[in-house]
Image: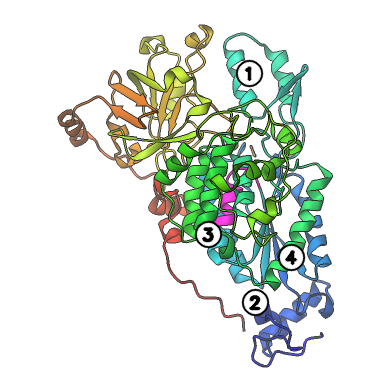
Amino acid sequence: HGGAPAPDGTRAPDGTTPALRSDQWYRTDGLRSFSHRARTRQLGYLPEEHLGKPVIAVLNTWSDINPCHQHLRERAEAVKRGVWQAGGFPLEFPVATLSETFQKPTPMLYRNLLAMETEELLRSYPVDGAVLMGGCDKTTPALLMGAASVDLPAVFVPAGPMLRGHWRGETLGSGTDMWRYWDDKRAGLIGERELSELECGLARSPGTCMTMGTASTMTSVAEALGVTVPGAASLPAVDSGHARMAAASGIRAVGLVREEARLSRFLTREAYEDAIATVCALGGSTNAVIHLIAMAGRSGVTLTLDDFDAVARRVPVLANLRPGGAHLMEDFHYAGGLPGLLGRLGEKHLHLDRPTVAHATLREQLDGALVHDDDVIRGLDDPLAPEGGIAVLRGNLAPDGAVIKHIAAEPRLLRHTGPAVVFDDYRALQATINDPSLGITADSVLVLRGSGPLGGPGMPEYGMLPIPDHLLKEGVRDMVRLSDSRMSGTSYGACVLHIAPESHVGGPLALVRTGDLITLDVAARRLSLDVDDAELARRRAAWTPPPERYGRGYGALYQEHITQADTGCDFGFLARKGEVPEPYAG
Ligand code: FES
Ligand code: MG
């Protein structure tokens, strides 16, 4: 090697095949190639260090503001080590960080922005394959949506869960126990001293939330889709095994380029169906419904809410993890992790003959997978719940659907009729929820609107509406709550979410009035407003759409193109089918 140009601009000069996409930048006989080689010398690399080697982009969502990814700056070095070892040439790209705890109004507003950044960086630079590093909630779907759209070989590296939380001899789960102790504080059961101790105990190491929240749900989805190395999703962020997994991912990325194995080989309809089954067996986050529909769309696979409901009815919940169960991700890892869980789902619930980035078939990948703790990963004959944690509801209040995670709700509420107490937006709710004149009782149905994809904007995780103080003090810990928003995967309760269409675009939720009777019937998959059609028509005639929020900028792009929850909240122009030409590199 040393820079002899490829005569036809596509083949390597020594005749090695396959030609690399990056050859277009580096190995043609034109001025541009000369310039790209000169600039790579400027970076300090010898020709023999990179020419003819697969260029692997390492997309890193590390940032000082993202506690879940604080180890990824260092961890990228392990990925690069693997890439070098396998004969590739790694280049790290910092990409947008979507920090679930800090970004307002919600990182969901920016999921599609990171997806666009991912797609366009991979397309516009000399990249043959990619390693995608993320895990905090929206980062996983964003990176995979973008990479699926450009369809290069790629491996996903989950950031990994943080270690278990501790406080006064108790094991704490992030999110879940934060909500619980905050309610205890509001109920007067704990004080400031306890609260400041809890601040130090809830999240005690780098890594993503260690309950089965959105982060672990989506990284498990990535593993189930077959685009991580086996066992990657549950590895604690600070475990030495995490660095070895990162190196192995770098090695596999180079291998995938050599095998010309693009993401589309793995991201098939069968893979997405298995991902849904995995979410159900994990009792995973309702956010997965939106993300998987969007991700599948980028792979040319149409998933609907009905696909989720159908899978959820047949797949039992096997993972005994908070918030639905008892344990945390560290326990899940020691119990056998996702390979253990997928092994138990087996032939009955999965498509075992599809390929993964690591094995010719999922069957081969799961061969020898063991479960070491039958309480953490249940057997099919001893599930945590007989059917999946997610149900899809329809009715005159949600013509395009809504979802509920019923294993996280008090069973008495799963069939309930009660009078609505309506809040027009989250600020109104915060200002008045404890107002005694509202007359809220344990049987009331709390309704929040103005919190959907456009109304929120970005469907903030407001869906676990707070229970009024006076009811908390009486010991009420769950109520029927409805909204067009989402709910954190670490939250719980009888919360009906993602009501579509949202109120902001004139969905029936916009027409509900305080005092109307609402019926939730999960077994019948029904959510209905007991108001007759003539009255609803009168209310609709009097309804005026809210003014547009954004006059310019990303928000304006968002409000113009965002789709509703039932179709995945992608941008229409990103989700649709269509050709994108390769850039001309010469
Ligand atoms: Fe990052 Fe929960 S806040 S994973
Ligand atoms: Mg979350």
Q: Is mark 2 within 8 Å of ligand 1?
A: no
**Residue bearing mark 4:** 91
Pointer 2 or 1: first along the chain: 2
Q: Amino acid at mark 2?
A: Arg
Q: Residue 154 versus residue 371: which sits nearer the camera?
A: 371
Task: Estimate how packed mark 3 is, as few (under 14), some (14 to 19) or many (20 or more) residues with alpha carbons within 10 Å.
Answer: some
Q: Amino acid at mark 4?
A: Leu
**Residue bearing mark 3:** 268
Q: Residue furthest top?
A: 474
Residue 84 image point, x, y percent: 82, 66
Q: Nearer the viewer, mark 4 or mark 2?
A: 2
Q: Amino acid at mark 1?
A: Tyr
Q: CA distance from mark 4 to mark 2?
A: 15 Å
Query: Residue shown at 30%/28% (left/top)?
Result: 528
Q: CA distance from mark 1 to mark 3?
A: 42 Å
Vertical order, 95 against 279 (above or below): below
Residue 546 image point, x, y percent: 32, 39
Ligand 2 shows up in the quarter that is: top right
Vertical order, 529 against 515 (above or below): below
Pointer 4 or 2: first along the chain: 2
Q: Is mark 1 within 8 Å of ligand 1?
A: no
Q: Is residue 367 magenta?
A: no
**Residue bearing mark 2:** 21
Residue 215 image point, x, y percent: 62, 41
